[in-house]
Image (cartoon, rainbow, N blue to C red):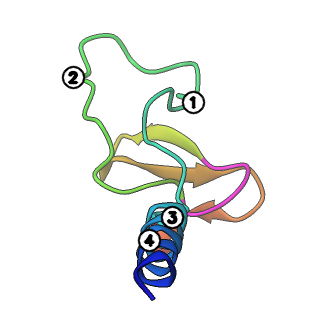
Amino acid sequence: MKKMLIRTSISATLIIQLTGCIAPPVAGIPVAPGIPPGVVYVAPTYVSPGSGYLWNYNINYGWGWHHPRNGWHRGWR
């Protein structure tokens, strides 16, 4: 009975560790080239919304995620 309890707790611990966050880390963010000089870099506060999005600067709104075909994430134009 004690061996079964130990196996169960080890299995539960492994499952909890393996089911962590599935979002990729924010480190190594692709930044689009052509940022104007004098612009202060602001790191994103959330992960990329999808494949193909670049962390880019918008002259009117500031920093945000931009996709070449889908445009700005969260509705910026």
**What is the spatial separation of the Cα atoms under label 2 and label 4, in whole angstroms?**
39 Å
* Disc 4 packing (10 Å; few <14; some 14–19; many ≥20): few
Labelled pair 3, 4 in contact (Cβ < 8 Å): yes
Q: Secondary structure at mark 1?
A: loop
**What is the spatial separation of the Cα atoms under label 4 and label 1, in whole angstroms?**
31 Å
Q: Which residue is mark 2?
A: 40
Q: Earlier in the sequence, mark 2 or mark 1?
A: 1
Tell which residue pokes out farthest to the front in this image.
Answer: 1
40 in magenta? no
Mark carried by residue 11: none
* Disc 2 packing (10 Å; few <14; some 14–19; many ≥20): few
**What is the spatial separation of the Cα atoms under label 3 and label 1, in whole angstroms?**
33 Å
Q: Secondary structure at mark 2?
A: loop
Q: Earlier in the sequence, mark 3 or mark 1?
A: 3
Q: Position of residue 19 (x, y in %)?
A: 52, 70
Q: Amino acid at mark 1?
A: Pro
Q: Position of residue 71 (x, y in %)?
A: 63, 61
**What is the spatial separation of the Cα atoms under label 3 and label 4, in whole angstroms?**
5 Å
Residue shown at the point (45%, 54%) measured from the top left: 47
Q: Amino acid at mark 2?
A: Val
